[in-house]
Amino acid sequence: MGLLHGAVQTGVAAVAVRSPEATSVGPIALGLLVAAAVLWGAVDTLRDLPSRGMQWFIAALVAGPFAGALGVIGSALLVDQTGQEALWVALTGGAAFTALLILAPAGLGMLLGGLLARKSSVSD
């Protein structure tokens, strides 16, 4: 998830630089990231992975700073002259936002996956 978030962050920055009038790219990218986490959380529940809640918590904590650093590196190399001053912001506030953007939808996905699993076991 960290790699996905970092890549999307770089892609959105590239579109914003090259085509400033494309304002709908950010919300669409955010929606796709939320959908990916919801779907992945539901699949983990349907697969009945043990301690998946703690795994998602740890994954969100690791993915936040990783995605922030990857986004800054990707923006510096591929988009514009982003410098190291952007790294501190990405590793603090950006990382916290990314962690929540992973953990909250994954929790929703686990809830929905549990409802689907319960529904399929009742109908069998």
Image: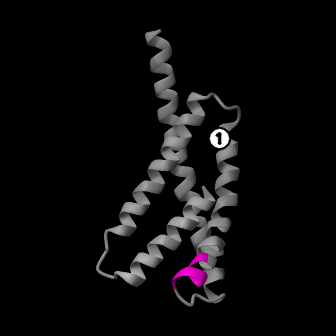
Give me the residue at 42% from left, 84% from top: 17
For this view, does 19 lie left or right of residue 119? left
Give me the residue at 65% from left, 81% from top: 87
- Residue 74, position as x, y percentages in the image: 59, 76
- Residue 13, position as x, y percentages in the image: 47, 77
- Name the image quarter holding the N terminus: bottom right
Of 74 and 122, nearer the camera is: 74
Residue picked out by circle 1:
53
Q: Residue furthest top?
A: 124
Q: Is residue 36 magenta?
A: no
Give me the residue at 36% from left, 68% from top: 25
- Graded by Cα atoms within 10 Å as few (under 14), some (14 to 19) or many (20 or more), the crowding at tag 1 reads some
- Residue 37, position as x, y percentages in the image: 52, 48
Q: Residue furthest left?
A: 21
In the depicted structure, whether residue 3 falls above or below residue 73 = above
In the depicted structure, whether residue 26 falls above or below residue 61 = below
Segment tinted magenta in the rendering: 74-79
Give me the residue at 49% from left, 42% from top: 39
Which image quarter: residue 84? bottom right
- Residue 8, position as x, y percentages in the image: 50, 65
Q: Which element type, helix, strand or loop, lies under badge 1?
A: helix
Kindly report the secondary structure that dominates the magenta region of the rendered protein. Answer: helix
In the depicted structure, whether residue 50 falls above or below residue 102 = above
Q: Amino acid at mark 1?
A: Gly
In the depicted structure, whether residue 122 falls above or below residue 117 = above
